[in-house]
Image (spheres, rainbow, N blue to C red):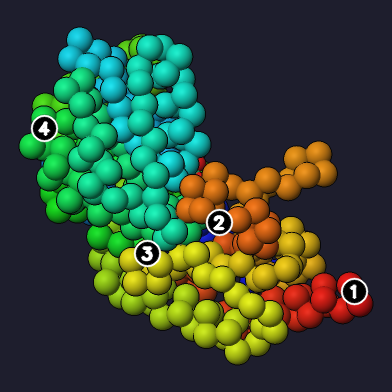
Amino acid sequence: MTAIYLDYNATTPIAPEVSKAMQPYLDHLFGNPSSSNALGQAAKSAIQQAREQIAQLLDCDASEVIFTSGGTESNNHALKGVAAALKHKGRHIITSSVEHPAVVEVCRYLEKQGYEVTDLPVDKWGMVNVKDVASAIRPDTILISIMHANNEVGTLQALSDISQLAKKHGILVHTDASQSVGKVTTDVKQLGVDLLTIAGHKLYAPKGIGALYIKSGTPIENILHGAGQESGRRPGTENVMHIVGLGKACDLAASKLAGQQTHLFELRNFLLEELQKQVKCEMIIHTPLENSLPNTLSVAFKGIPAHELAATVRSKVSIATGSACHSGTTSISSVLKAMGVDEATGRSTVRLSVGKYSTKDEVRKAALYIARGIESIQENRK
Ligand SMILES: Cc1ncc(COP(=O)(O)O)c(C=O)c1O
């Protein structure tokens, strides 16, 4: 029996439609998109089609999308690229204290290069207060980078309000939408952002492929230097097969977004109800259920170490924990810390994330396995 998969925020399987679209590029359509021969031209037009599919999902022009190796590279490109292009204007960047390391670590790097970064606090639900953004803005602020949806707790930020504010001050806005693309609407015009990060493996495309939306006219420097691919913005022979996969995944997401959203929301809420019925210990919910990714549930089972629970249920359910173990000690995630979650609760926190292939039956069984796992941990303690 394979374990029930409740870790879609970590990564998703490749959709069969996606692998089918990619297959010819593995088998025989191996051309270099920069070659003028027939195979090269086939690859070139496949890339263009993928670019258009992504543009459709984001409601932007295809020329505003570049392909990258994933969420990490897109975030690096956005932050370092804008920082370099605007250093004459200012060296201050605003971000939040719940970002993924792919933004946090870029900020730490930029600090070493002489930039100043303000990490905004969040409330107990992981929300940035727009008033805090307003008071952090300085004459030398060049960029605001705030994630669209949090990977651990699922919180959705008030990005359009933040963007409106930024626009009044002539500040660019980047959002890491690695977790939200394909799960909720990510219309760049509605969000009002200048740059947006996509990570393929969070939306049923392969790992190692991503994209960056760069609004036309945005000042940004390259982070890689080489030949002229991607309109001179991201050199290197294109990863055609994976680009085709990402395009197909975005196409599927765009055509089924509303239905998917309802499916995920209902399943996540059903999971919570089942847990509330079955589990015999206090539960503390960290996810703001009405303002979050519809698939995510971050919950602490009071007094039950999350690592022990994950190990106990491992053969039956795949879950994630909100803490990391290093040489025998457990530290809670920076996201939970920023939300004011105490150490004990953080160590008992698990992240459950459903996906498009999750079923009601699976979710019911998963809740039962988790409840049994908790009981066995409680029993062993007696
Ligand atoms: C919010 C967020 N940003 C960035 C990333 C990094 O994406 P990738 O693994 O494609 O580099 C992830 C993946 O875990 C993520 O959840």
The residue located at (46%, 33%) in the rendering is 104
Residue designated by label 2: 341
**Residue type at tag 2:** Val
Instruction: State the image coordinates of residue 361 (x, y, percent, origin top left).
Output: 57, 85
- The mark found on residue 292 in the picture is 3
Determine crowd level at label 1: few under 14, some 14-19, many 20+ residues with C-alpha closer than 10 A.
few
Cα–Cα gap, marks 1 and 3: 36 Å
- The quarter holding residue 203 reads bottom left
The amino acid on which the numbered mark 4 sits, given as a three-letter code, is His
Mark 2–mark 3 distance (CA, rounded to whole Å): 18 Å
Pointer 4 or 3: first along the chain: 4
- Asked if residue 245 can be seen in this view, the reply is no
Number of labelled discs? Answer: 4
Front in this rendered view, residue 136 or 5: 136
Amino acid on which the number 3 mark rests in the picture: Ser
First along the sequence among labels 4 and 1: 4
Q: CA distance from mark 4 to mark 3?
A: 28 Å
Residue holding disc 1: 380
Q: Earlier in the sequence, mark 4 or mark 2?
A: 4
How far, Cα to Cα, is label 4 from label 2?
34 Å
Relative vertical location of residue 227 with respect to residue 319 in this rendering, above or below: above
User: In the rendered image, which residue does mark 4 sit on?
Assistant: 169
**Residue 199: quarter of image:** top left
- Beta carbon at label 1 within 8 Å of ligand 1: no
Element carrying mark 3? loop
Viewer-nearest of labels 1 and 3?
1
Q: Is residue 379 left or right of residue 331?
A: right
